[in-house]
Amino acid sequence: MLSLPIAFRSALGVFAPVFSRPVWQHVKVLLTGAVLAPGQRTVTAILRIMGRSAAPDFQTSHRVLNRAVWSPLTASRLLLRLLVAVFIPRGVVIFGLDDTIERRRGEQITAKGIYRDLVRSSRAHVVKASGLRWLACMVLAPLAWADRVWALPFLTVLCPSGVRLALDSREDVSLSRPSAHPRSHQ
């Protein structure tokens, strides 16, 4: 059985209502492993660091992300409340938004689009990149042990391209209004 420090258990416990009891057991392992895993935090790497790579229910933990019924929007709301309570207990809460392009290829990646790469482009030279556009919402918090403000993400949503939305017969979603997209809530 997984034995965790009380402070960590209470922070994780905030998210328990989002999941069914059987799924919650897998989520605790995944969240703990995400904190401990060095490098990429894939489900496989997380299970490996938790000593579960040879477990007979290895594939069940993968299904938490793609088959289990839970609300990412509810989880992000709880995470936002936790971040504000811990890092900004009083004063003004400042939010940050950042979009990024995940370069993906393949026929089955349907939400991909072609976007201007702001990092590699200049006024004179435009570089385009194909992939998925994600919008991350963050709380900007001054941390006591750091000399700068940290961006603490609490929600990331997929922002499909205008072409993809037109093909799906939906209205366009700008980066400032990702919640208008019906799939961004779940």
Image (cartoon, helix red, strand yellow):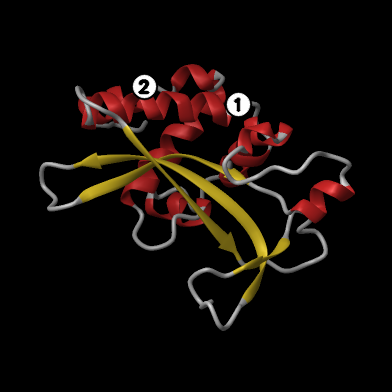
Q: Quadrant of residue 141?
A: top left
Helix, strand or loop under label 1: loop
Vertical position of residue 101 compared to residue 59: above or below: below
Q: Is residue 138 left or right of residue 67?
A: left
Residue at (38% x, 21% y) in the render = 14
Three-letter amino acid code at disc 2?
Gly
Please state, as top left, top right, bottom left or bottom right, where the N terminus lies in the image: top left
Packing grade of label 2 (10 A; few <14, some 14-19, many >=20) is few
**Which residue is located at x 63 percent, y 30 percent?**
185
Q: Report the side of 11 relative to 170 (left or right).
A: left
Mark 1 highlights which residue? 70
- The residue under label 2 is 13
Q: Residue at x 41, y 39 (%)?
A: 31
Report x, y in % for residue 78: 42, 23
Distance from label 2 to label 1 (Cα)?
15 Å
Left or right: residue 6 compared with residue 113? left
Amino acid, disc 1: Trp
> Badge 1: how crowded within 10 Å, few (<14), some, or many (20+)?
some
Residue 61 in picture, x, y percent from top left: 56, 41
